Image (cartoon, grey):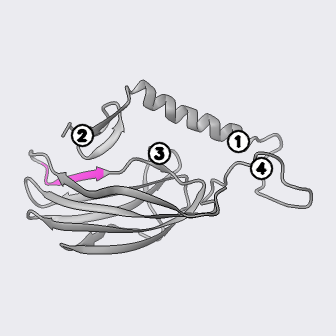
Amino acid sequence: MPDVDASIVFLPRFTTLVGAPGSSTIFEFTTLPLDVSRHGGAQFQIWRGPISGGTFTFFMEESLDAQKWVLGASTPEGVVLAADETKFCSYSFRLRWFRIRIQLTGAAWPIVTCWAEGLLRGGGGGVWPAPMASAPPPGVSGAVTPSGFDRLALKKLIDSEVFERFRRGGGFGLYRGTLQPGGQGGGKL
């Protein structure tokens, strides 16, 4: 388990998000799910420039399975950013997966430039402690696990399932602001 910080770029400087035309006036974009089981939290900053007639709201979301997403306990609702505003965020992980969801609303063709970057803090996070390569030393207690439970084997199984899902989907593609496996998400940009 790393005890050091690692830099992370959720959205590169400078990313432009564009809502597709249609009947909808709410456009959502997400980052890829990030396995944060080896990290305790994140400290990052998010910035956005002017938007063409609409609002910019971001949500910090967590998941146990990278499929069903919930808002974190420390941010039970979205955060609205004003034009040219930088927001500094500190977030402690509870679940295994983390992502940022951005919602643009209001205009028929909202266009905005933004970025988000920062640090992943060292230390195990949430309910997903890093797997141990061997048993803990005598006298050292760890997480309570059933007899014969192999965390490393479970992590490998979960990781292989996620990898297999991506492989079967034909690789990655950019879909309506979301980098997702083989065609899931909105229409192509």
At label 2, the amino acid type is: Gly
Q: Total of numbered circles in the picture? A: 4
Image x and y of residue 149, in percent: 77, 41
Residue picked out by circle 2? 186
Residue picked out by circle 3? 66
Q: CA distance from mark 3 to mark 2?
A: 17 Å
Image x and y of residue 39, in percent: 58, 59
Q: CA distance from mark 1 to mark 3?
A: 19 Å
Give residue 82's mark: none
Q: Nearer the viewer, residue 86 or 187?
A: 86
At label 3, the amino acid type is: Ala
Residue picked out by circle 4? 145
Which sits earlier in the primary sequence, circle 2 or circle 4? 4
Q: Nearer the viewer, residue 157 or 133?
A: 133
Q: Which residues are magenta?
A: 24-29
**Judging from the image, what secondary structure is the residue with disc 4 in?**
loop
The correct choice, above or below, for 20 with respect to 139 in the image is above
Which sits earlier in the primary sequence, circle 1 or circle 3? 3
Left or right of 105 on screen, residue 34: right
Comparing labels 1 and 3, the label whose residue is closer to the camera: 1
Which sits earlier in the primary sequence, circle 4 or circle 3? 3
Left or right of 104 on screen, residue 109: left
How crowded pointer 1 is (Cα within 10 Å; few <14, some 14-19, many 20+) is rated as: some
Name the residue located 33 percent from the left edge and 42 percent from the top edge. 179
Kindly report the secondary structure that dominates the magenta region of the rendered protein. strand
For the residues bearing labels 2 and 4, Cβ distance under 8 angstroms: no
At label 4, the amino acid type is: Thr
